[in-house]
């Protein structure tokens, strides 16, 4: 059973059929409590100022046309372990962009790609990472959401034979010290969340009552949820009324939202103004429940990531807004980092690569959205 505490001991613990946890969040200094094990991007660049110039030059490379490299005589081995069994297409697009860019660069490679369920397949993920210790791929690409994987990652790195790329995390772990993975890559969760905070504050300038649907009790929820809480709690007119962990699972998010409706519906009036969703699957599950009770018109729900399903929901006037990642930049960045490494230019690879976002909302100009989609999915939308 997961443990909970709140500003004064969390007020109550609630269980329902598919729901794992309810908690009332405190307005304490969450940045201090939750993030002290990580370097935020600005903090890392202050600590290692040479990284700024490296990052800027590398970003230009990611945005530029392909620069082929001399053919590498032997095929390199790349192992990918992603929590890709979910509605969000981020992970599948990541692999597509990576392989397309590698092909265009001219790198000879063998790819072993494994998809698991987010949050719930921790033992399988551990086994797959453990396989890398024995199979010694040249590059292991993984996401460090559960801290239990940290020791496995350290074990692989200690071999000195496999270079680690940590995907969907852009905040280096302080405990790794100067022995950091080869690359942290993704779209900074704090930056994306801050865009959502500003949009909600713009829509509710006088304050609001809201709920949060977290994913798992891991890194992504800490950053996406924690940053949102701390910034909204800094203004007294915004009141967090409920929150749930729903494992990045659409059905669990629906069940949690049904419980929210039971908790906060009075005389046919829903007392919450918006639901902050920490992922695509969570947003869609919340919308499922609200539509079931004809409440969607009353409640704002955001997306997170701007993948195909979210954009379709915005076009259909169901999802209200989202932060859209320029998705394929993550795969391009990994391919370019590998290319530089193989060319003996590993010093030109930054520790962190974070791609950019665009705020997308209902009513966006269709041509502008089409330009964003063309850029974001420039490789992953291509037919093989």
Image (cartoon, rainbow, N blue to C red):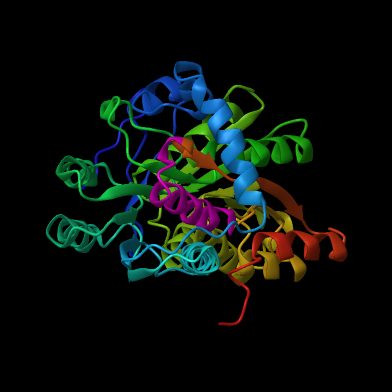
Which residue of the protein is positioned furthest toward the bottom in this rendering? 384
Residue 59 x, y percent position in the rendering:
61, 42
Give me the residue at 34% from left, 54% from top.
Answer: 142
Viewer-proximal residue, 371 or 5? Answer: 371
Does the image show residue 191?
yes
Residue 354, relative to residue 216: is it above or below?
above
Question: Magenta part of the protein: which range?
Answer: 328-347
Residue 329 x, y percent position in the rendering:
58, 54
Residue 11, relative to residue 149: is it above or below?
above
Give me the residue at 47% from left, 60% from top.
Answer: 70
Residue 168 x, y percent position in the rendering:
45, 49
Q: Is residue 377 left or right of residue 140?
A: right
Residue 315, relative to residue 323: is it above or below?
below
Give me the residue at 52% from left, 67% from top.
Answer: 93
Q: Is residue 120 magenta?
A: no
Viewer-proximal residue, 177 or 318? Answer: 177
What is the chief secondary structure element of the magenta stretch? helix
Give me the residue at 55% from left, 42% from top.
Answer: 354
Q: Is residue 382 left or right of residue 158?
A: right
Which residue of the protein is positioned furthest toward the left in this rendering? 134
Position of the C terminus, as image quadrant, is bottom right
Residue 193 x, y percent position in the rendering:
59, 40
């Amino acid at each position: 059973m997961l443990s909970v505490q709140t500003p004064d001991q969390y007020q109550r613990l609630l269980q329902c059929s598919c729901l794992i946890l309810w908690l009332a969040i405190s307005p304490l200094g969450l940045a201090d409590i939750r993030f002290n094990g990580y370097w935020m991007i600005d903090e890392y660049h202050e600590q290692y100022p040479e990284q700024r110039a490296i990052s800027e030059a590398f970003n230009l490379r990611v945005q530029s046309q392909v620069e082929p490299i001399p053919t590498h005589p032997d095929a390199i081995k790349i192992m990918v372990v992603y929590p890709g069994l979910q509605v969000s297409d981020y992970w599948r697009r990541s692999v597509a962009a990576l392989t397309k860019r590698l092909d265009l660069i001219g790198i000879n490679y063998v790819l072993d790609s494994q998809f698991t369920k987010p949050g719930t397949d921790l033992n399988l993920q551990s086994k797959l990472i453990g396989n890398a210790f024995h199979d010694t791929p040249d590059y292991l690409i993984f996401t460090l959401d559960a801290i239990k994987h940290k020791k496995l990652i350290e074990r692989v790195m200690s071999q000195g034979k496999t270079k680690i790329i940590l995907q969907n995390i852009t905040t280096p772990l302080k405990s790794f010290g100067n022995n950091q993975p080869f690359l942290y890559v993704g779209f900074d969760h704090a930056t994306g969340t801050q865009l959502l905070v500003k949009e909600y504050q713009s829509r509710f300038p006088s304050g609001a009552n809201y709920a949060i649907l977290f994913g798992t009790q891991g890194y992504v929820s800490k950053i996406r949820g924690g940053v949102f809480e701390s910034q909204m709690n800094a203004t007294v007119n915004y009141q967090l009324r409920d929150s749930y962990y729903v494992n990045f699972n659409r059905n669990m998010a629906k069940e949690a939202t049904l419980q929210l409706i039971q908790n906060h519906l009075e005389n046919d009036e829903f007392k919450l103004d918006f639901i902050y969703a920490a992922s695509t699957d969570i947003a869609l599950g919340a919308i499922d429940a609200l539509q079931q009770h004809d409440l969607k018109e009353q409640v704002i729900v955001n997306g997170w990531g701007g993948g195909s399903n979210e954009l379709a929901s915005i076009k259909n006037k169901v999802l209200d807004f989202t932060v859209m990642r320029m998705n394929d930049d993550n795969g391009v960045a990994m391919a370019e980092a590998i290319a530089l490494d193989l060319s003996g230019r590993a010093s030109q690879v930054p520790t962190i690569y974070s791609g950019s976002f665009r705020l997308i909302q209902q009513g966006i100009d269709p041509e502008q959205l089409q330009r964003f989609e063309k850029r974001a999915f420039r490789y992953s939308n291509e037919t093989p």
